[in-house]
Image: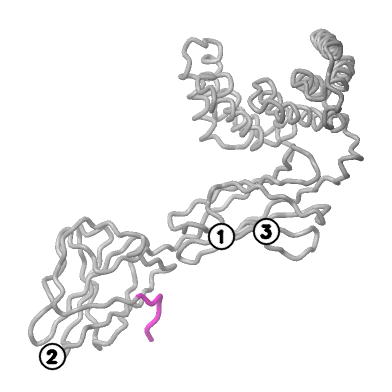
Amino acid sequence: MRHGCLIALGLCLCATCAHADATPADNELATVPNRDIALDYAVAESPLPLLGVELWYTFDRGDTWRLYGRDADLKPPMTFHAPQGGLCGFYFVLTNAAGPSGPPPALHTTPQLWVLIDEDAPIVQLHRPTIAPEGGAHTTLWLRWTVLDDGLGERPIELSYRALPDGAWQELARELPNTGAYDWQVPDALAGEVAVRLTATDRAGHRTEAMSPGVVLPARKPLAEAKNPADELASARSTRALTAEDMKRARDLLRMGRRHALHGAHDLAVGRYRDALQIDPEMPEALVGLGASLYALGEYDASAHAYELALRYTPDERQALEGIARTLVALQKYDAAEARLMTIVEHEPQDVETWLHLGDVAIYKGNEVSARDYYMKAATKSPDAVSVVARARARLDDLPSLHRRWEATETP
């Protein structure tokens, strides 16, 4: 019984060996999931009966050809069992009373048919979803993944979710490109703990799934009921224009807050920063100071929110970007921290201190390859930064044990 993946090929007895670069275009490449292939050749009509069908194959793009065999019954399809996986080229030589369709394939003969024998399913890692720190009326989950496969199509990713413990899976998004990232605005009706599932499908039809750990969605409240002090400070500026006296009073309170923070009195500093923001809710310096003091007090969620507000008004504020990255690391939101630090080096590629921090974040993520790349940038982009270069080189020398030590400190 003939079996295997059916691949159709039209042939003519007047075929000749073509010599060209053996590189198949995507539209010339068939992909199959296993080594059993049924080649359904179709021969153009001829007054002379078919006397022989030879099948040749190559696994090195035409550098060498091997005779697979002859079709005993001269009736398609002809079954081919591949000795290995990978890119395989096929060439038929047909014979009738007038002779063969051409000589056997030789060095660099272009195959009549290309087939990618892909026996491997995609390798999939779905990272822990991260709740975006911007707050507001809606919850956003940052979904990040790694999918490796040589035979992926253009849009191989499908995402779904379910409420835990026993909710049914619901479609989240489908036919996504393999960008490694998707920001999901969670439906307002969804609450409690949820899990996300990623499915990657390659051209051969192999499917691999990965499911995330459960994520507890934050309880949402109308903005008017928000209790976070930073939320209250984020309300729109009063319709009353600030007077010169208002601005002076706000600046005085800012200086007092900074003085308290300098002496380690962060609880007092928080009070003064909030007083300044009561006068001018859009003062970025006070928001940055508030974020730093809240971080020092271990109030990481409130700290992140203050930094987010500062970035809303001044998106490229260096201190706010550094501060929120540090706070996100404390919250174990490593992807989000990396994104904030990348914003800095996009504008200042010679900033070796930030490259060093990026390397540290990569270690927390368990990505030793990225950590090495970031530490190399920290060590080479600005040789005059002697202290940073020394720290980066020390981390490079100690990278494997550094990874193991930090991995051991992670919360299970």
Residue at mark 2: 48
Q: Is residue 74 above or below residue 220?
A: below
- Report helix, strand or loop for mark 3: strand
- Residue 24 seen in the current view: yes
Of residues 196 and 351, the one drawn nearer to the viewer in this rendering = 351
Image quarter in which the N terminus is found: bottom left
- Say what amino acid the circle numbered 1 marks: Glu
Q: CA distance from mark 2 to mark 3?
A: 59 Å
348 shown above or below 145? above
Asked if residue 209 shows in the view, the reply is: no
- The one nearer the camera, 240 or 27, is 240
**Picture quadrant where residue 52 is located:** bottom left
The residues colored magenta run 1-7
List x then y, in percent, for residue 66.
21, 66
Question: Residue 259 in the image: x percent, y percent?
Answer: 82, 8
Closer to viewer: mark 1 or mark 2: 1
Question: Residue 339: image x %, image y %?
Answer: 61, 34
Closest to the observer, 163 or 228:
228
- The residue tagged 1 is 175
> Local crowd at mark 1 within 10 Å, few (<14), some, or many (≥20)?
some
Looking at the image, residue 291 lies above or below residue 264? below
